[in-house]
């Protein structure tokens, strides 16, 4: 008897479970006080259910976790290239795991589903559709909020804090407003630039929009 083909929804759910298991396995490799508590909190949070955005990459249930794992995969490769070219060993794999998987903790509970009238571009008709909207509960900023949430559980290095704080690069609202502190951060550690590059690569080339 031929095996039953999985539906698209079933494949998506299987992928979400595999993504969650991989992320938790990676986080357990970080040997720092408080990591067990961080993992417990993460499992109880909406992290594995949230989208990565409302209209762009990963704008679907589970998109945030998927994006975070993609950033990890990209950052691992960038770390290898960097260390091969410059022969520097100051990019610990623990920092790669923390920066990649935790950089968007600010998006936990940041989105909520709501009904909106959306125009169907094929029929030209307006339809009521359930989509994600923003629900900012901290008012703290993007990277800053992620750093705050992570440090509730584990102590971070200066390099990790700077990388996550500025992972949006030139898209960060502070940079757009004229703040050039990012230049100082980039001069202190290559992790700032590498995390931003990994984030951009994942969102632009590894993920879809629905």
Image (cartoon, rainbow, N blue to C red):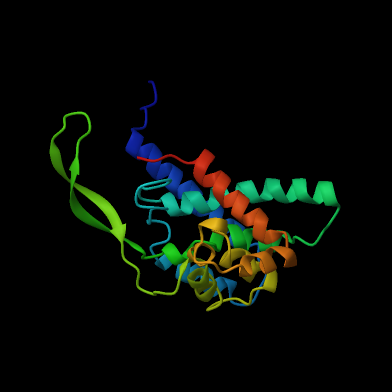
In this orientation, which residue lies closer to the viewer: 6 or 126?
126
Q: Is residue 78 left or right of residue 66?
A: right
In this orientation, which residue lies closer to the viewer: 127 or 71?
127
Q: Is residue 207 left or right of residue 115?
A: right
Rendering coords of residue 108 (x, y %): 41, 64
> Residue at coordinates 80% horizontally, 51% vertically from top-left?
83
In this orientation, which residue lies closer to the viewer: 125 or 182?
182
Rendering coords of residue 16 (x, y %): 43, 47
Rendering coords of residue 143 (x, y %): 52, 67
Q: Find residue 47 and report its image quarter.
A: bottom left
Quadrant of the drawing holding the N terminus: top left
Figure disc tally: 0
In this orientation, which residue lies closer to the viewer: 177 or 87?
177
Q: Is residue 44 above or below residue 50?
A: below
Rendering coords of residue 74 (x, y %): 62, 46
Residue at the extreme top: 1
Residue at the extreme right: 87
> Residue at coordinates 53% horizontally, 39% vertically from top-left?
205
Q: Is residue 50 above or below residue 153?
A: above
> Residue at coordinates 39% horizontally, 21% vertically from top-left?
2
> Residue at coordinates 35% horizontally, 40% vertically from top-left?
210
Q: Find residue 10 and report its image quarter.
A: top left
């Amino acid at each position: 008897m031929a095996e039953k083909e999985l539906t698209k929804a079933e494949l998506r759910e299987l992928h979400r479970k595999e993504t969650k298991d991989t992320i938790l396995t990676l986080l357990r490799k970080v040997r720092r006080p408080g990591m067990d508590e961080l993992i417990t909190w993460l499992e109880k949070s909406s992290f594995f259910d949230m989208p990565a955005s409302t209209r762009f990459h990963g704008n679907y249930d589970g998109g945030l976790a998927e994006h975070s794992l993609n950033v990890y995969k990209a950052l691992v490769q960038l770390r290898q290239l960097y260390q091969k070219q410059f022969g520097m060993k100051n990019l610990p794999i623990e920092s790669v795991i923390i920066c990649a998987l935790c950089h968007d903790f600010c998006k936990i509970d940041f989105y909520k589903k709501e009904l909106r009238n959306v125009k169907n571009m094929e029929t030209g008709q307006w339809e009521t559709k359930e989509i994600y909207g923003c629900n900012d509960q901290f008012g703290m900023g993007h990277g800053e909020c992620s750093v705050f949430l992570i440090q509730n559980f584990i102590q971070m290095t200066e390099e990790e804090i700077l990388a996550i704080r500025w992972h949006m690069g030139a898209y960060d609202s502070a940079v757009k407003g004229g703040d050039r502190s990012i230049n100082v951060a980039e001069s202190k550690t290559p992790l700032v630039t590498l995390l931003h590059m990994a984030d951009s690569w994942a969102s632009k080339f590894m993920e879809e929009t629905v």
